[in-house]
């Protein structure tokens, strides 16, 4: 059976290609989604690519992921630095998860240096632009296969 991964994208990531190209590049959200889908197809896995600006929806997606996916990738965006609820949801699930950021959060504003969710995930990828998504997919498959 094919491995299935959920990729959750938080607030404002739907505006990729329109915002702060210096941090996020020029790839659009739809372009990123298609790139991830093509990569998944090439390596023989399924992905589901979600985006929401609403914190509670992210929590619900995480909670439902345990029974429906083999692994989870989360780019919580601004909620990375503020959401205890997302942290708690990530702590509950049993599937492996990876935290992902397009920019290097440690080289940006001081408030972005602290991630509340890092302690609940198996790995963190940041600073590789949208290519970090492909790295996260490959890394997560590695974690799933070791499980």
Image (cartoon, rainbow, N blue to C red):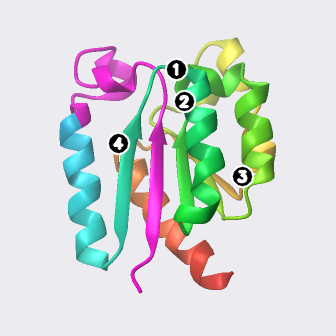
Rendered-image quadrant of the C terminus: bottom right
Return the residue at label 2: 57
Instruction: For marks 4 and 3, give the one nearer the viewer.
Output: 3
Task: Residue at 58%, 83% (x, y): give it.
Answer: 145
Nearest to the observer: residue 5 or residue 61 = 61
Dot label at residue 54: 1
Write the start and end of the magenta stretch as one range.
Answer: 1-29
SS state under label 2? helix
Return the residue at label 3: 121
What is the crowding at mark 3: few (fewer than 14 residues within 10 Å), some, or many (at least 20)? some
Pinpoint residue 47: horizontal percent, then vertical percent: 36, 60
Q: CA distance from mark 2 to mark 4?
A: 23 Å
Quick check: marks 1 and 2 in contact, CB under 8 Å? yes
Q: CA distance from mark 2 to mark 3?
A: 19 Å
**In the displayed structure, would residue 33 be above or below residue 1?**
above
**Quarter where residue 82 is shown:** top right
Instruction: For marks 2 and 4, give the one nearer the viewer.
Output: 2
Instruction: For marks 3 and 1, give the one nearer the viewer.
Output: 1
**In the displayed structure, would residue 28 be above or below residue 66?**
above
Dot label at residue 130: 4
Pinpoint residue 101: horizontal percent, then vertical percent: 51, 37
Instruction: For marks 1 and 4, give the one nearer the viewer.
Output: 1
Q: Earlier in the sequence, mark 2 or mark 3?
A: 2
């Amino acid at each position: 059976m094919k491995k299935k991964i959920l990729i959750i994208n938080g607030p404002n990531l739907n505006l990729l290609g329109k915002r702060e190209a210096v941090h996020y590049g020029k790839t659009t959200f739809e372009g990123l989604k298609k790139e991830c889908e093509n990569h998944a197809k090439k390596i023989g896995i399924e992905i589901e690519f979600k985006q929401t600006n609403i914190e509670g929806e992210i929590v619900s997606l995480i909670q439902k992921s345990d029974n429906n996916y083999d692994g989870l990738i989360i780019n919580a965006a601004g909620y990375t630095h503020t959401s205890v609820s997302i942290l708690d949801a990530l702590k509950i699930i049993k599937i492996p998860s990876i935290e992902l950021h397009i920019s290097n959060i440690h080289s940006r504003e001081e408030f972005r240096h602290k991630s509340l969710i890092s302690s609940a995930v198996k790995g963190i990828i940041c600073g590789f632009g949208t290519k970090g998504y492909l790295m996260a997919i490959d890394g997560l498959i590695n974690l799933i296969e070791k499980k």
